[in-house]
Structures are given as C-alpha cells and as structure tokens.
Image: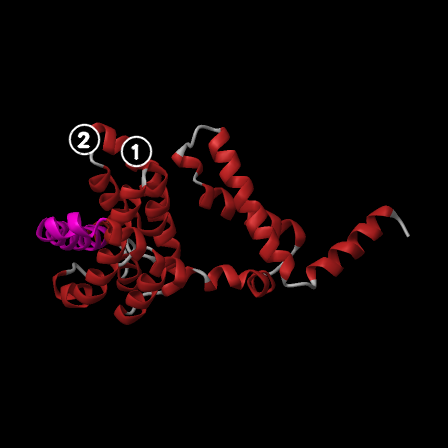
C-alpha cells in the first residue's frame, strides 16, 4: 500500500466521524479570526466570510457533500438560537439608555426596515426582476431564519433569500466602516444600531469588535429589523412594484 492509499484510508475513516466537521469548522473559524487580525481587521476579510470560503474549498477538494458536513457541524447551527437569545445580556446592561432613546430607535428601525425592503424591490423591478425574485429580495436585510420564513410566506424562494442575506451582510461589513467615517459618527450606540439594522448577524458580530456598547445596540437593531420586517412586510406588499 502506498502512502497516498494510507492517507486516503485515514481520511475515509475520519470523514465517517461526525466530530470531524465540527472540529474542522471550529479550527477554520479560529484560523480566520487569527488571519483577519494579522491583516489589520480588514472588514473585507471578515472571519465569517473567510471561514465560509475556506470550508467551501475544503468540501470541494474532499468531495464531501453538504449533508455529510451538516451532520457533523449541526451543533454549531443549534447554537445559533441560544447565541441570538444571549444578545439580551448586553442589551440589559444598556437598558436605561435604550429606554431613553426608545422613540427614535423605533422610528429608525421602522424606517430602516421599510426602506431596505422597498428600495431593494424597486431596484430589482427596475432591472426586470420577476415576482418570485422580488419577493425573495424583499426580506434580504434581516437575519437568515426570519428572512427565509418571510420569503416563503410572500411566495419567494427561501434558498435565494438566504444567499441574498449573506451578500447583504457581507457588503454591510465591507462598507460600514467607510460610511461611518464619512458621516463622522462617533457614538458607538449609533454605529452598532445601524450595522445591526442593515447587516444583521454579520454586522452585529463586527459591531462587537468595536465595543460592547456597539454590539449591544447592533443586537437591538438586528432584532427590531427582524420583528418589523416579519410584521410589516406582508402589509407593504400592495405598495411594492411587482
């Protein structure tokens, strides 16, 4: 037996264990965090984006299908729910400021969610998008589980919406630092709320790298965007150019 055959046998044996892909996911993410820091924290190389690219490459190179990968990495998916709920902890620390700013935060949240949906659909319609595509595009600015549920309710394609949500979060992370500097925004609460409202989970993760305060308000923006979109978007359908 050659060395290549031995390596192949070892890989087949490891691949049969669900823990392999859980371990691989964690190792790749830690490497991506390290690499992002080494490169100066460039938002274009967000650890989540780097991890996705590396994992996709590994799956393609090893010929591993997604179902096999998910069987091992589903524990990370399970933790998404508790992690989202845990955003309430930093929010509690800033509850007094949130209570004082409640009215402007609600106005900003409703306006942001409405503009995100209406503008995306308007641009898509102007470019000749079909109704199914437009309904998939409408909830692209909220976190994936909510966006997919809303898209399905509206008659869109949840899988397409998931990809659009990822693109929105990625672009938000890349563009947010420059826009914040351009507008001269200094308050971490405002930075975080805007990033969570427009770039959902990825924006919230990046906001925590600014400060705990930015992360807390990003979590609030993410939650408001999801809630407002789920409640209001079905009512706004009559105003959408479809």
Q: Nearer the viewer, residue 57 or 227?
A: 227
Tell me: 208 left or right of 193.
right
- x 26%, y 69%: residue: 154
Task: Please say which color scheme the image uses.
Answer: secondary structure
- x 33%, y 47%: residue: 204
Tell me: 15 left or right of 157.
right
Q: Which quarter of the picture shows residue 10?
A: bottom right
- x 18%, y 30%: residue: 183
Q: Nearer the viewer, residue 34 or 98?
A: 98
Kind of element beneath mark 2: helix
Q: Nearer the viewer, residue 198 or 59?
A: 198
Q: Position of residue 61 (x, y in %)?
A: 65, 49
**Predominant secondary structure, magenta span:** helix
Tell me: 163 left or right of 8.
left
Residue 142 visible in the shown view: yes
What is the crowding at mark 2: few (fewer than 14 residues within 10 Å), some, or many (at least 20)? Answer: few
Residue 138 visible in the shown view: no
- Magenta highlight on residue 107: yes
Label annotation for residue 177: 1
- Magenta highlight on residue 232: no
Kind of element beneath mark 1: helix
- x 31%, y 55%: residue: 89
Q: CA distance from mark 2 to mark 1?
A: 10 Å
Q: Position of residue 60 (x, y in %)?
A: 61, 51
**Residue span colored magenta:** 94-121
Q: Which residue in the protein does label 2 denote?
A: 183
Q: Quadrant of the C terminus?
A: bottom left
């Amino acid at each position: 037996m050659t060395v290549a055959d031995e390596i192949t046998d070892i890989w087949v044996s490891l691949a049969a264990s669900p823990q392999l892909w859980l371990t691989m996911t964690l190792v790749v993410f830690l490497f991506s965090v390290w690499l992002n820091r080494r490169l100066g924290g460039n938002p274009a190389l967000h650890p989540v984006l780097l991890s996705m690219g590396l994992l996709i490459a590994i799956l393609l190179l090893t010929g591993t299908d997604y179902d096999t990968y998910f069987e091992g990495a589903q524990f990370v998916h399970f933790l998404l729910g508790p992690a989202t709920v845990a955003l309430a902890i930093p929010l509690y620390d800033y509850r007094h400021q949130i209570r004082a700013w409640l009215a402007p935060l609600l106005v900003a949240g409703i306006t942001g969610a409405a503009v995100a949906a209406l503008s995306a659909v308007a641009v898509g319609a102007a470019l000749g998008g079909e109704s199914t595509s437009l309904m998939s595009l409408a909830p692209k600015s909220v976190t994936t589980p909510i966006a997919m549920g809303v898209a399905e309710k509206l008659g869109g394609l949840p899988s397409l919406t998931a990809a659009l949500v990822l693109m929105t979060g990625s672009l938000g992370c890349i563009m947010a630092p420059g826009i914040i500097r351009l507008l001269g925004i200094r308050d971490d609460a405002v930075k975080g709320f805007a990033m969570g409202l427009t770039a959902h989970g990825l924006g919230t993760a990046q906001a925590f790298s600014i400060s705990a305060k930015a992360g807390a308000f990003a979590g609030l923006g993410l939650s408001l965007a999801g809630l407002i979109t789920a409640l209001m978007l079905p009512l706004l359908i009559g105003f959408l150019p479809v």
